[in-house]
Image (spheres, rainbow, N blue to C red):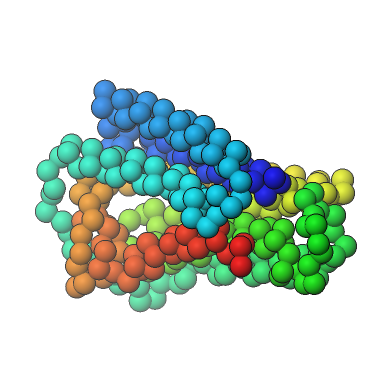
Amino acid sequence: MMASFQWLILFETLMLTDLLLLRLTRGRDRLTAIVMAEARGIRASRIFCGAVMAIALVGGLVIALSPEEVLFPWLLPVLIMVPAVAASLLFRWQRRAVLSLEAEQAPRKAVLDLAGEPTPQALWLAALPPLITAGLVYVLAAQWSSLVLRDPAPVPATTPWHDPGFKGLVSFLVFGVVWNVYFGILSLMMWYGVSRQYAFRRSQVQAAVALSWSQTLLMPAWVLPLWLRLSPIGLLVCAVSFAVGTGLLVRFGRRARRDWQASDMPPSSYRFYYDRNDPSAFGERGTNLGNPWNWALFTAPAVFLALPLWSLW
């Protein structure tokens, strides 16, 4: 029962994230703000909010009332992917709506001359969050027998890696590592795959690294108290971690959003195109699906599909 409650918390958190995404993307740039302020944008927002709340209610009831043999091995992974599908449909609609504002303009060829340009020091910080999570998993494995679980197994496992509770906890932490990889690739793509003519590059890199660190701090901060009966000091550490992670998210996210709005990208930047001869991963022409950076960026989230099943091994 405790395992179902933990998956229910994850599912409802993801659905809440969808509502926050709607709020954040409504005014991320001038063109999106124009679209979302129109009658079609208001109507799309209401439909999206209604759909998210309906999915959260129905999916939550399914997770709460279904036995684990019904949730696994396929129903729960499908439900976990629903929030991502809903968000992708919203972004797709916004992209098409922006493109309808104006005919595509003649693109300027992106020239990625990076000679003599120093690599931002923030990029190196993107390598640390996965290592920190790996260290946390190592410490949990070493101290697992001395930790007090909220839902202990009837028969103690010989090793932590055979304990369903431990594997479930680690699956959540690995969920955060996947986001670390995604934001790390995004930071590299924004610096090495975007032309120098765009002033928002540096703030986007810093925001991607900050989001990676935010995930590393936020994920243990709310997962560990759900699995373990922590001491007051442990709860205080989780609270501080949550506050710092949220602060990073807000501070660098707002700065990146401000610089992105100031760039005033044309509607053509919302298109997808394929051009192996164009070194740009993103620019006024749009997102180049022929660029290897985008291959890595769009492939990384596929790992999410395997995470709910990993805890059953």
**Label total for image:** 0
User: Splitting the image into 4 quarters, where does residue 47 fall?
Assistant: top left
Q: Quadrant of the C terminus?
A: bottom right
Residue in view at x 78 percent, y 57 percent: 153
Q: Quadrant of the N terminus?
A: top right
Residue 188 at x, y = what percent?
A: 43, 67
Q: In the visual, does 12 lie left or right of 218?
A: left
Residue in view at x 55 percent, y 55 percent: 72
Q: Is residue 15 above or below residue 277?
A: above
Residue 187 at x, y = what percent?
A: 45, 62
Residue 165 at x, y = what percent?
A: 72, 58
Q: Is residue 83 above or below residue 203?
A: above
Residue in view at x 27 percent, y 32 percent: 35
Nearest to the observer: residue 122 or residue 245? 245
Residue 281 at x, y = what percent?
A: 30, 64
Q: Is residue 110 visible?
A: yes
Nearest to the observer: residue 95 or residue 168? 168
